[in-house]
Amino acid sequence: DQQVKQNSPSLSVQEGRISILNCDYTNSMFDYFLWYKKYPAEGPTFLISISSIKDKNEDGRFTVFLNKSAKHLSLHIVPSQPGDSAVYFCAAQASGGGADGLTFGKGTHLIIQP
Amino acid sequence: KAGVTQTPRYLIKTRGQQVTLSCSPISGHRSVSWYQQTPGQGLQFLFEYFSETQRNKGNFPGRFSGRQFSNSRSEMNVSTLELGDSALYLCASSGGLLGGWETQYFGPGTRLLVL
């Protein structure tokens, strides 16, 4: 049973436009959420995180939104640049009881078209 | 600050052999977690070490084990390799004191191919 779901395996966006990547989760114990960017044969690179006490966190071109009632989060990238082309993973963890390990979605392959 | 380093980067083994992978965390980080990435299962949590003790464990068989040294460096061992163990093995480090509120930073991974 997938506890973190990224329902779009791929997404194509034109350069300069907004990229919106979505993620749903089912485990109500999750209260810390992260987005990672990954290139092939490399480790994930941390992008941005949000805790359940907030509904928005912004860092430069990246903004993460959290809707706890819908168990949904999204990553907005504005404006999208060619270097943003990569696989994006949504990850979640439960803060209580120590680090139980990140639970990852399957990833969304973002392609930025020139 | 140097990032998480993993050695070796690539490894080829045959079924039945065993393998040891190494991870050096970011300086000052005391928690090291290991993950396996495969095309079918995605990224899955193996285990986490903090202060030389396994603190959390994912759902993997006992063939997968690890340890952590006093300098926080960690090793992961897989015994009696199976073809399905072919994967990218990723190590991540964090401070370790805030538990689930902390961001984990990943190394480049070790690509293991089992023939």
Image (tube, coloured by chain):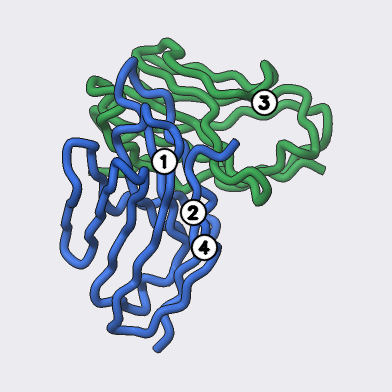
Chain colours: A blue, B green
Residue at image location 80% in from the left, 39% down from the top: B83
Gap between marks 1 and 4 measured at Cα: 31 Å
Image spot of residue B75 (x, y percent): 52, 25
| Chain letter behind tag 2 | A
Which amino acid is tagged 1?
Answer: Thr
- When the figure is inspected, residue B86 is found, relative to residue B80, above or below; the finding is below
**Which of pointers 1 and 4 indicates the residue nearer the eye?**
4
For this view, does B80 lie left or right of residue A109? right
Which label is found at residue A80? none
Q: Check disc 2 and report the residue beneath it.
A: A6
**Which of pointers 1 and 3 indicates the residue nearer the eye?**
3
| Chain letter behind tag 1 | B
Q: Check disc 3 and report the residue beneath it.
A: B78
- When the figure is inspected, residue B46 is found, relative to residue B65, above or below; the finding is below
Gap between marks 3 and 4 measured at Cα: 33 Å
Crowd rating for badge 1 (residues with CA inside 10 Å; few <14, some 14–19, many 20+): many
Gap between marks 2 and 4 measured at Cα: 6 Å
Say whether disc 1 or disc 3 marks the residue closer to the N-terminus.
Answer: 1
| Residue A104 in view in this figure | yes
Gap between marks 1 and 3 measured at Cα: 19 Å
Residue at image location 83% in from the left, 27% down from the top: B16
Q: Check disc 1 and report the residue beneath it.
A: B5
Residues under numbered marks 1 and 4 in contact, where contact means CB atoms less than 8 Å apart: no
Residue placed farthest to the front in the image?
Answer: A69
Image spot of residue B98 (x, y percent): 23, 23
Which amino acid is tagged 4?
Answer: Ser
Which amino acid is tagged 3?
Answer: Val
Q: Check disc 4 and report the residue beneath it.
A: A8
For this view, does B105 lie left or right of residue A110? left
